[in-house]
Amino acid sequence: MTNFLSQFFYRKIHQTRFLKSVVAFFTLSFFLLSMLSLNAQNYSTKSGRAVKFYKEGSKQNNLLNYAEAEANLLKAIYIDSAFLEAYMLLGDVYSASGKFAKATEVYQNVIDLNPEKYPEVFFFAGLAYYKLENYEKVIQHLTVFLSKSTKSAAREKRTLYLTECSHFALDAKKNPVSFKPVNLGENVNTTYDEYINAIRSDGLVLYFTGRDGKNSEKGGDDFYFSTRTDISHPWRKSQKVGPPVNTPGDEGALTITPDGRYLLFAGCHWQDGFGSCDIYASRISGTEIGNPVNLGSVINTPKWESQPSLSTDGRTLYFSGIRQGGCGNSDLWYSYLQDNGEWSIPQNLGEIINTEGSEMAPFIHPDGQTLYFSSDYQIGMGGMDLYVSKKDSTGNWGKPVNLGYPVNTAGDEINVVVSAAGDKAWISADKYGGYGGFDIFEFDLPPNVRPIPSTYVRGFVFDAKTQQPLEAYFSLIDLETGNEIVRSFSDKSSGEFLVCIPANRNYALNVSKEKYLFHSENFALEGSSNLLNPFQLNIALNPVVAGETMILRNVFFNTDQYSLKEESKVELKKLLDFIHQNPALTFEISGHTDNIGSVEYNNQLSEYRAKAVYDFLIKNNVEPVRLTFKGYGFSKPLCENDTLEGMAKNRRTEIKILDTTKQ
């Protein structure tokens, strides 16, 4: 069996887009043709032979035998060249079989002969011209149709929509965005189809759906990944992700969390599933991938849920689903991971995003504010187009913006993946040449649809004494709001962790593990200078033993003052947790300064600052017997005081373990 989701997500949508147009034409024509067949006396011909061929053509059309239908209708028209009903039905046959240019010629015959008898001809002609991307003709014909009084409310709505899309397409083609897609090369793309799934936040690991050709006739779609050593280097030869994610069954729509620790994807018709397709997650540990876990009955229903995308903090899941309460066909939904570890009841993203058509392939950027998705009923070029929506200051999603032509075309553009920095994007397409079928391409994202730039922190956590890698908990906190942006664990086999950081904020990073002192870092990203130089950290955790010291890098004071700044409370709450979790420990709080000013001044300032921390801890129920404080001025520098960076590192607050047995 072929991979159901990759079929649905790409190939099936691409192929069935034509079938949907066939169904649309057939359905739209049905009532008109029924009226014609029920009232033979209303035929525009007096020829019984012409009517006979017309009826046979109608019969063959109903059986979807379009070649036979065409032959009979042409005979009817040959007998009577003014046979309006035969022209109308022949136009529908041509439209249903994808011969849109011929359809417009036939509809024009009706318009030339007697447009008042069947004003619907302007509507059907407009549809055919829309398929031909002749938007001027679409507008011309649909404008005439709107002036007629015989239209239904549903057809009027459709006409208005197609007219607006045509105006948009005309303008988009006159004002194309910069778009220069670059093929990822033969290590990723093959003569078969490759569909982009995800890029890790550091841009060094790519995931996609493809096939190796060995089982091409049976399907053989699987998840693959490719790596590179640097974003300027080419991709290495791709490899299969392998079991337990790749199975003989149906799975697709894979994504990776920004920290690189989890794969999310859809499994279809699995034994533990709740419906046709469910969302699953697998944890990555080193080179091992854990068994897929179903996200449960709150997320998954007896219907269809797929195409997951998880926010940077790991707490908000976006996905596409066909569920009760939606706006149309497939809608975009979101759910929060609650403090009790359960997912909240999914909420619809609302009518600003969702339409009566299909919305698919959500991609939430690491900035947490920018959502990319595809839709076949937002105003666009036709088929599935790609859009972006951004959250406003109140947390509401803004009106979607089309990514523009030629990123979007009259065909189907299904999904897009955007880099953390926001400047690069990846799509799958069969339009730009390549190795065969759908290939994966990289391109520069147009500036007007870029997200907030983000960078990342890569770290390695290890035991300071043994140098062995550690699986440690880490969290990234917005210092201004106190909100936790990311929480996760470093890899147990390598000690590696990856944190994505949106720009223009200040962050505290805390790394902790039981029986070790915690480690803190500060990242001030008020400008964009750090985006091209991601942070690389080697974090040595010291075991909890007497004499060990940890630096509180996120305790802040104003210059020459000793009142704690509000953003210090994030770190101090972390310290409180550590102290309460280790009731046998006693501590010294020490203050340190740079060398500006006298020895006496700096000794006093550093002691006042140490006491400010001491007072905070006492106020929050730490027993005074467990704490002492002291100011060391600039007598114990970490660096030379000859640079601003060195002076900043010397201005610090430290916690030293005095004893492991409380007095």
Image: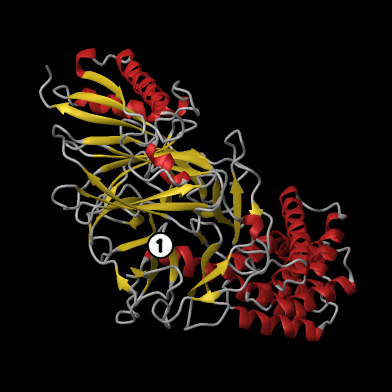
- 248 left or right of 422 in image: left
Instruction: Please identify the quarter of the rendering in which residue 187 is found.
Output: bottom left
Residue 596 screen position, x and y as percent: 46, 34
Quarter-wise, where is residue 51 in the image? bottom right
**What residue is shown at x 58% (from left), y 40% (from top)?**
350
Q: Position of residue 451 (x, y in %)?
A: 57, 52
Q: Is residue 92 above or below residue 615?
A: below
43, 155: nearer the viewer: 155
Q: 584 or 30, which is in the foreground?
A: 584
Indicate the position of residue 570 as horizontal and vertical percent values.
Answer: 39, 29
What amino acid is at disc 1?
Answer: Leu
| Figure quadrant of residue 224 | bottom left
Residue at (34%, 55%) from the top-left corner?
260
Colour scheme in use = secondary structure
Quadrant (top left/top right/bottom left/bottom right) for the N terminus: bottom left
Q: Is residue 49 above or below residue 271?
A: below
Is 156 situated left or right of 559 in this image?
right
Image quadrant occupied by the C terminus: top left
In the rendered image, which residue does mark 1 sit on?
5
Residue at 72% across / 68% down in the picture?
176
Residue located 35% across and 69% down the image: 227
Q: Describe residue 218's horizontal placement relative to residue 100 as left or right.
A: left
Which of these two is toward me, 422 or 496? 496
In the rendered view, tell whether residue 457 sits above or below residue 352.
below
Q: Is residue 35 left or right of residue 487?
A: right
Q: Secondary structure at mark 1?
A: helix
Residue 323 appears anywhere in the view: no
In percent of width and height, residue 647 lies at 43, 41
10 Å crowding of disc 1: few (<14), some (14-19), many (20+): many
Q: Nearer the viewer, residue 96 or 457?
A: 457
Residue 448 visible from this viewpoint: yes
